[in-house]
Image (cartoon, rainbow, N blue to C red):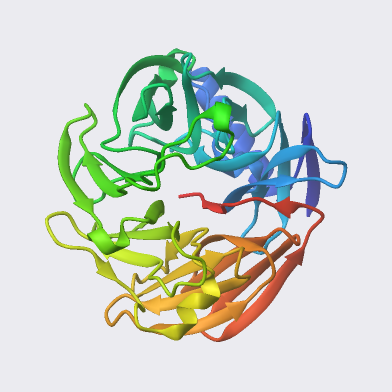
Amino acid sequence: MQTLVRHWGLIPVSIRWTATKVASRRGFLAGLLAAGLTPQTSWADLGCPAYLSAGKQADGSFVLAGVSQQGEILFRCPLPGRGHAASAHPMRPEVVAFARRPGRFAEVIDCRTGAPLARLDPPAGYHFYGHGCFAPDGTRLFTTENDYDNARGMIGVWDTTDGYRRIASFASGGIGPHDIMLRRDAPGLVVANGGIKTHPDSLRSKLNLDSMQPNLSYLGFDGSLDDQMQLPADLRLNSIRHLAMRADGTVAFAMQWQGEVGADMPIVGLHCPGTPPRLLAKDDPRLRNLNGYGGSISFNSDGNLVAVTSPRGGVVQIMETSSGALRHEHHLTDVCGLTTSGGGFMTSAGTGQIVSLNGARVQVLARTDLRWDNHLIRLA
């Protein structure tokens, strides 16, 4: 067995090949070169990371990290400021890392080298909301944005084949768009419009609690409004923030309550276009342990469970999608990042821990030196 260690800038990637595999790969590459072709780099070139997350290092600097299925940090790429979420290109080892709201940077990073490929700057009078997603073919990037002088939620459209040039924008269908995902039941996008009016001059102050109305908006790639779901009037202060998508197109949404502190409000809902929302665990007194705050949301691989994190409550709750019952609750300090892992879930926390949850079983996979930020993004 031969061990080869490649160093691409900041990123050490250890690759083990047998001599036979090395010879086979060299022959394969030689054949491609002879045919005038070159192999396209992929996530496999970085050791096949399973997840991405932003984090803060001990020296106060910020990075985007690639994480293995076992919780090992495979690479770190520097960020110009605190990150929130990230979106991975569907074909290339390339990531767009978004600033925490109300940030104005979205950094396009070549994860093989840590080198910035481009920086997306929103138009004057706009800022990013921390999330974005690629079109299925990777040729366009869609970003959630705030046109703050006009109190409009917007979706920016960027051409990834031309240096991430901004080519269009259209209305998000509401105020305060945060998370955005590709639909699985039809071509298009689903946007979590949180409903909260903000302005950079007022920092993170909420300016319209007397009239806010969150919604889920289902948009075509051209900005057409295909469907929209609004919460009932008694829940209009439940800001819809984060999304997860099941294989059949069912959307799970996590909310953040803006009303009276201590109220036992539902924080997780499910929705399919053309139907009313279904709120989970709404009569369970343990909802108060979420402290009115859903940080991240995810289905498990089978789609029969959905989990939500609350860094404010220091808790993860796992609910059945069929009955809506709250089945498991795990107390983890400053937990927020969440994603699918096998039949269960993986979480990350500001303590540096990466933890696997499978039913009632809790396993600490890693204790890292990073203070993990809000989201744990699954690749593939």
| Quadrant location of the N terminus in the rendered image | bottom right
Residue at left offset 45%, top offset 50%: 380
Q: Is residue 377 left or right of residue 212?
A: right
Given the current orientation, which residue lies at the most extreme front position? 210
As drawn, is 89 to the left or to the right of 45? left
Is any part of residue 138 visible from this angle? yes
275 above or below 332?
A: above
Identified at 20% across, 40% down, the residue is 187
Q: Out of 90 and 209, give the one closest to the viewer.
A: 209
- Could you tell me which residue is drawn at 22 percent across and 63 percent down? 277
Q: Residue furthest left?
A: 274
Q: Residue at x 22, y 29 (%)?
A: 223
Q: Residue 366, percent across and down? A: 74, 65
- Number of on-image labels: 0
Is residue 347 shown above or below 198? below
Nearer to us in this view, 213 or 244: 213
Camera-nearest residue between 318 and 247: 318
The percent coordinates of residue 21 (x first, y second) are 64, 47
Relative side of 222 to 240, left or right: left
Residue 361 at what x, y percent from top left?
A: 59, 84
Q: Is residue 263 above or below residue 240?
A: below
Residue nearest the observer in this picture, 142 or 229 = 229
- The answer to whether residue 17 is visible is no
Q: Quadrant of residue 231?
A: bottom left
Query: What is the x, y in percent for residue 135?
Result: 34, 33
